[in-house]
Image (cartoon, rainbow, N blue to C red):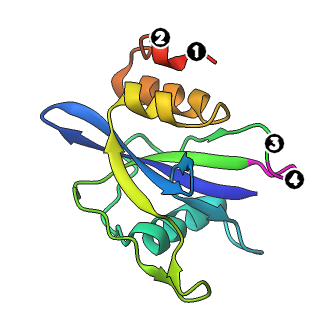
Amino acid sequence: MSAGVVVVRSVDRKLRFLLLRAYRNWDFPKGMVEPGEEPIDAALREVQEETTLDDISFDWGVDFMETGPYSKGKIARYFIARSKADQIRLPVNPELGTPEHHEARWFDAQAALAIVSPRLKPVVRWAYQIITGTMLPESGTDKP
């Protein structure tokens, strides 16, 4: 199992989602849960390791959403947290000698929905609904 965080921030009273790009794939900060580690702790650790963010707060509690199986049957569990940071640093992973991701960007909800893989679209919608109390409007960019 992997665990991650849908990191959001407010910009001019508009919601922004942090997505990380590895090659052509955009995802939220996440990684494997280590033996004996709780998923919430793994999620926090992965956010810090992948982005250096250390200011995230779980303003909406620690409810989570899990994705369906992907990549050899893995399940990803996502929590929601807020950050006040605007600049994201992608540190070098000591095992790789390079950062794990090629890019980090803040996206509005519709852009996030348009760029993530099909397995993450429900996660974007779920987080948006938890945070705003409303459903994410459908858009033409979301169709397969």
Q: In this view, does 134 lie above or below 50?
A: above
* Residue 99, horizontal then vertical, whole percent: 48, 75
Give the amino acid type for the residue marked by disc 4 in the picture.
Answer: Lys
Residue at 48%, 28% in the rendered image? 114
Front label number (3 vs 4) = 4
Write the start and end of the magenta stretch as one range: 71-75
Give the amino acid type for the residue marked by disc 1 in the picture.
Answer: Lys
Considering the whole magenta stretch, tell me its main secondary structure.
loop
Residue at 40%, 67% in the rendered image? 51
Kindly state the secondary structure of the residue where label 4 is placed.
loop
Kindly state the secondary structure of the residue where label 2 is placed.
helix
Front label number (1 vs 3) = 1
Kindly state the secondary structure of the residue where label 3 is placed.
loop
Separation of marks 3 and 4 at Cα, in angstroms: 8 Å
Q: Name the residue under label 4.
A: 72
Front label number (3 vs 2) = 2
Give the amino acid type for the residue marked by disc 3 in the picture.
Answer: Pro
Q: Are marks 1 and 2 in contact (CB under 8 Å)?
A: yes
Tell me the tag on residue 128: none
Front in this rendered view, residue 127 or 104: 104
* Residue 144, horizontal then vertical, whole percent: 64, 18
In the rendered view of the protein, which quadrant contains the N terminus? bottom right
Q: Mark 3 points at which residue?
A: 69
At label 1, counting other C-alpha atoms closer than 10 Å, the crowd grade (few under 14, some 14-19, many 20 or more) is few
Q: Are marks 1 and 3 in contact (CB under 8 Å)?
A: no
Q: In the rendered image, which quarter is residue 15 located in?
A: top left
Separation of marks 1 and 3 at Cα, in angstroms: 21 Å
Tell me the tag on residue 140: 2
> Relative to 136, is 63 on the left or the right?
right
